[in-house]
Structure formats: C-alpha cells, structure tokens
Amino acid sequence: MTQLAAALGTISPKAIAALHQQEAEAFLARRPQSCALFEQAQAHLPGGVPMHWMRDWGTPVPLVIDSARGITLTDIDGNHYRDFCLGDTGAMFGHSPAPVQRVLRDHAGDGLTAMLPGADAAVVAAHLAERFGLPYWQVTATATDANRALLRWARAIATLTDAKKDKVLVFNGCYHGTVEETMVQLHDGRTVNRPGLIGQIFNLSDSTVAIEFNDRAALSAALARGDIVVLLAEPVMTNCGMVLPDEGYWAFAQAECKKYGVLLAIDETHCISSGWAGYTGTHQLQPDFLVLGKPIAGGLCAAVYGFTAEVFAAMNRVRDQREPGHSGMGTTLAANLLTLRAMRAMLSDVMSHEAYAHMLPLAEYLADGLRALFGRHQLPWSIAQVGARCEWIFAPTVPRTGAEALAREDDHDLGAALHLALLNRGVLVTPFHHMCLVSPQTQRADIDALLNALDDCLLLLKHLSQPAG
Ligand SMILES: Cc1ncc(COP(=O)(O)O)c(C=O)c1O
C-alpha cells in the first residue's frame, strides 16, 4: 500500500471522483455569469485569464472576483467566500487595508511614478532597519526582482576578492519567484533544471547548486567546494509544502556560511507570517541580505531587500571599480511614489505588533482545530505551521526535506475535490498545499466556518466511500 493510500484510510478514489463531479456541477450551477464571462474572455485571453497560472485553481471556470474586502471575497455571481489564501500572502493582512485605502484616496492625485524618490522612502527604510536590524535597503517591484538583484550583487561582491566564486546555493524544492538561478532541483544527487520550464535554454546547474534542506553534511560539503557565493533560502521552506528546520539547523547553517565566507540571503516573503520581524527576528537570524515582497505594500507591486553595512561597503567598492555602462538591474516602476506611500502605511499601521498578537493565537486555534478534526475522522494527516501560516498534509508526518515534500505531491485528486467542495461552502484555501493564512481581519467564527466546511466535506467523502446497497 502506498503512503498516500494509507493516509486516505477508508476514503476511496471512486468517492474522490464522485465528490469532484458533484461539486463541479454545483459550482457551475451557481455561477452563470462566470460561465458567460469565461466564454467571452477566451476570445482574447488564453484560458480566459490574464495570467496563465490563474487557471491552476482547478475550478471548472475561473473564479472571477467582483470585490475583496477584509477576508471576504465576492465573485461576479454574488457568491461570498472567506478567504484563507489571501493572494498567497500578497493580501496577508486582509484585502485593501484601511490605511492603504486612505493613501490611495488622499494621494492618487499627487503622482504615481516619477523615477524620483518621495519623502516616504527614507521613512520606510528607517522603519525596515529598525524592524529587521539591517541598516540599508533597496526597493524593487516584486520579490522575484529583489532576489535577482541580491544574487547579482552577491556575485559582483565575490569578484572583488575571489573570481572563482560564482555559484548560488539553494535548497531542493525551493521557490524564490521566477529567478532563473533558482529553477533547479536535485535528481539522483545532481543539480538539474526543474522539469517543465518553458523556453529555458540554459543549463542552470552552471550557476546553481541545490542541496537538501536540513542535511547538514550536504551543506558543509557544498560550502567547502569553494565556488559558492551566496546561500539563498526561505527560513522555513513553504513552496513545496512546508518543510520546517530541524532544531539548531539555522544556527549551524549560519555558522557554516560564516566559516566559508558565503553570504546568507533570507527570503522572508512567506515567512513574514512568523512574527513582526519575520522568522529572522523571531529566531534571531543574522543574514547578510533579507528579502520581503508580497504583502509589504498591501497588495500593490513592491518588495524590498536589505543588507548589512559590510555588504554596503562591498557594493560601493563594486561601484567604484566597475566600467561605466548599464548595471543590468532595476525596473522603471520599482520604488514608485505611490507604492512607497502604501508601504509606509503598511509598515506603520497594518503590519503591527497588535496585528500579530491577533493572528498568531488564532492560527494556533486553527491548527488545533484541524488536528482535532482529522483525529475525529481517524485520518492520519498532519499540520505544518509557521506563525500565521498553516497547512495540512495528507501524511502522518511533516516532510524534513524538499525531496520528501515533492515526493508527496501525489494528493492531487483529493486536494482538487476538497478545494472545490470548500469553495461551494464559502471557503477559499490556497490551491497549492492546502495552505491557510490567518490575517488581522480573520475572526474565530471564520475559522469555525472553515473547520465546519471541511468536516462536512470529509463526512461526504466517507459516505461516498461506503459500498452501494
Ligand atoms: C519565498 C518567495 N520568494 C519570492 C517569491 C516571488 O514573489 P513574486 O511572485 O511576488 O515576485 C515568492 C512567490 O511565491 C515566494 O514564495
């Protein structure tokens, strides 16, 4: 029996297929406008959506949003949803936070972008320095771009002292946005391009080495190669399912990076769920670079990367020594006037200590509720959590490495059926990895509604799994 079959217990594949079919029919019946719009949209939008992965939700037609307020989504057919996906973190502090609305209302007429800084930039940087303990900051349009930029800087810094160092180290199963260097995975112990990359003509192992998370020997061996410039990592892996660090892993990894003179870049884009200063602040990490994107401007396109005084000094040496010409970094709309205003409002009024004091215990309540629910249904499913970010896994233990997490991605049919069934019951969970975010707007009643809806779906699956007659 496979691990998945064991984890599903009495839930049969036939029941999963039956649930999916009945939920798809119910979904379509209650969304006539969405169906009509889908027909229309396909004339000029491939798949009827403006961004291709918006079809990856597994709904029969796209869920088309009319409004998103707090954690309530309303589709164009008037169906309401409690949103636990929250734009996969972009709206982690609730949709359209009031302070950002005020910025838009009061300042939309004061200029949107000028390729020049407004007065908010210095305030934002000072706030970030206080929050994350890194003195210097730059602003980009997306977290992808922030990661790209820091990799460029890290390599440039390495050439100051050691031209042989040019490789990026990442963890198997990582995701840091569509950064070319990170689109790799381990295959039989070798770093190879991830499968499925569209139009990728480069051998990415020329620039990158992948190792397993939590594998101390592999980390030491990689660093000892002598060609690694920077380790780019999420402190908790969140993009192949959640993979938590072993006790003491980060203390070890940091010390090893220092020993081998390798820069450490921590990507907090998802792990900002850990607390006010992300995982870094909560667990006293001391990275050379830190990246934060997604929620930082409340859902407007923006991200930041911070760095130490030593990195800044090295950047200046790079600047002094380089030939005149284009840096090859930066985009026109990055750090524009409006997003800096929004960022200032988010940092000072929304991503507050009070917000986390609400979110973190409520996420515990959700995790406990899920544990109790799966226990009642005698399902050996587990919960992984990093602060306000919580997900369930169709397996009795949480994975320790990316390879383990990726090997478990065989729960697609059950996941798809459950997500659709939850949507029909007014609950939206992130389609990848059954991930739920608890925002400052989320209330206990919302979590009870999620637990009740999931309970209902599991009862139905049990019922559908019983032999007919
Ligand atoms: C950890 C992490 N870093 C960076 C990114 C890239 O963010 P964006 O797509 O906004 O550039 C993501 C996106 O999911 C992410 O999960």
Image: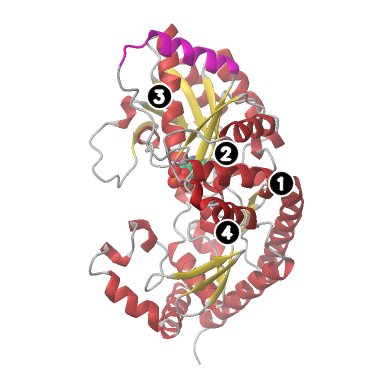
Q: Which residue is mark 2?
A: 268
Q: Nearer the viewer, mark 4 or mark 2?
A: 4
Q: CA distance from mark 2 to mark 3?
A: 19 Å
**Coloring scheme of the render?**
secondary structure
Q: Which mark is residue 445?
A: none
Residue drawn at the location 45% of the way across and 67% of the way down: 416
Q: Amino acid at mark 2?
A: Glu
Q: Nearer the viewer, mark 1 or mark 2?
A: 1
Q: CA distance from mark 3 to mark 1?
A: 32 Å
In the figure, 171 relative to 55: above or below? Answer: above
Question: Picture coordinates of residue 237 (x, y %)?
Answer: 54, 42
Q: Amino acid at mark 1?
A: Ser
Ligand 1 within 8 angstroms of badge 2 C-beta: yes
Q: Which residue is mark 1?
A: 352
How packed mark 4 is, by other alpha carbons closer than 10 Å (few <14, some 14-19, many 20 or more), is: some
In the figure, 393 relative to 68: above or below? Answer: above
Q: Nearer the viewer, mark 3 or mark 1?
A: 1
Disc with the residue nearer the chain's start (4 vs 3): 4
Disc with the residue nearer the chain's start (1 vs 2): 2
Q: Which residue is mark 3?
A: 152
Question: Picture coordinates of residue 5 (x, y %)?
Answer: 50, 63
